[in-house]
Image: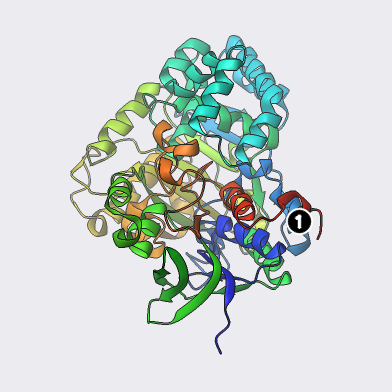
Amino acid sequence: MPVQYDAIVIGSGHNGLTCACYLAKAGLKVLVLEQYHSIGGMTNTEELTLPGFLSDTHAFCLQVANFSPALHELQLARYGFELIYSDPCFTHVFPDGRSISVHRNVDETCHSIAQFSKMDSATWRRLFERFLAVKEQMVRSINSPPPTFADQAALLESLPGGLDEYRFQLQTFRSWCDEMFKAEETKVLFGSWDLHVGASPDDVGGASLAWLFSMVIQHFGNNVVKGGMRNLPLALAGYLQAHNGEIKTGARVSNIIVEDSKAIAVRLVGGEEIEVSRLLASSVDPQHLILDLLGEDQVGMNLANKMRQYELGESVMVVYLALEGPVEYKAGPLAGQSAYVHSTPASLDYFSRLFYEVRRGWLPSEPFVLLCNDSARDPTRVPSGKGLMKLVVQPVPYIIRGDATGRIAGRTWSEAKEPFADYIIDCITRDSIPNLRGKILKRVVHSPEDLEKLMPSAPRGTITHGAFKPYQMGSMRPIPEMGQYRSPVRNVYLCGSGSHPGAGVTMAPGRNAAQIIYQDLHLDFAKTLGTQ
């Protein structure tokens, strides 16, 4: 007789596993289904270039996850999870060889900024003090289900300066920068973080996103998972299995079987059906859950149409590099010691031009590249003396309609990705790492189309499970009808980055969804956490 599970979780990314761990901790019999041959989703690590070179497939560092109680509640250190505390946290380099480094010590950061503007150095310190004053409130906000729009508005209206805070939440990054900073170098230091979530200098809401990322890194650091990001999902899997949970890889869900408005089973590609008695949680992107796994017949035409209109965000391209040895940055050794390096001209107009070109479908003339110094921060990922980097190119067009580089003839990604990667390497070699090209042993390029094929939860090569827009955040993420992790089917829940607080390695959507599930099952979340 087939085993019946209390709960099934679709997707073994870190959020799906986090949710599964809390469900198992409550005594539920939990099964996690993963379509790929290994767990982790966008927190996986693989030998993508050469044997012995361990590349993180996407996420490389922890930032907002440092806010998460889950690291301790799920005892992840017991299951092999260990962090490397990088210093500098990140460095922003400019084509003329100058740079700003953000260190773990705020005095050192302010000293680095002061070379461009003493006023901006003092402003950074004030902004950091403001962050410390609201840190506990922010931790609660991220690690709790979002308040309703009405409750949030009432709170802001009741607080001194609450409407100023609301203004800040809506402010564009350009507007805020012009109010706060003098030097263009400081402006782009902040603004480059918005590119991680696909926000341009003139997109509403960009100011608060840039401030949050920058201050989180100043306070908690930009920390690297020792041995590869996969050790986060492996630790979660260890906890889950210690609490009698199971994981099945190579198991792609075709659809969710619903009877009387309740999910009763999942059907896998190939026809196998697995029954579930109490609930199902999905960490896949919300469009895939609603339109494909449940379908319009179950959710209704109105909600299905809303999900079709859901904005996915900007596409990305990734270049993985196995290197003969360490590289040398034009800006000096601090850049090479940083986990992340941002490399741009000292101009907000650079970002505006980049988004203008990409959003009209052009390959950008000056791509923004997040430079990840994988082996410099964690030598265990490579054979002795070798090097490893990852280049995350964001944003790029999903459909190529033109070329602003003047060098790429192809108009499909299969034709364009290698020539565009050549162009990117040339730009980095010219502006940031003069010896990069000569150090490359092998490279592997993943276009947006490649990412989409490898990970169904990266539709159109996006990585955020939905754009970071004010109307797709908080209790409106992904849409208001599902802003509390509940789907239209009464025992089907969302637990991925398509829910509050959104993308990135935070563990928060998975933990927050578990809190809602506990409520619906009449379980005491705090009491359960009191037992191991």
Which residue shows up at 59% across the image and 59% down it?
386
Left or right for 308, reference 269: left
Q: Name the residue under label 1.
A: 528
Image position of 69 with respect to 115: above or below: below
Which quadrant is the N terminus positioned in? bottom right
Classify 10 Å Cα crowding around label 1: few (below 14), some (14-19), many (20 and above): some
Which quadrant is the C terminus positioned in? bottom right
Image position of 117 with respect to 76: above or below: above
Circle 1: element type: helix
- How far across and down, in percent of the image, does residue 486 sit? 49, 51
Which residue shows up at 69% across the image and 56% down it?
523
Which residue shows up at 62% across the image and 64% down it?
383
Left or right for 525, reference 55: right
Q: How many labels does the image show?
A: 1
Which residue shows up at 54% across the image and 18% down it?
165
Looking at the rendered structure, the kind of residue marked 1 is Thr
Image position of 172 with respect to 465: above or below: above
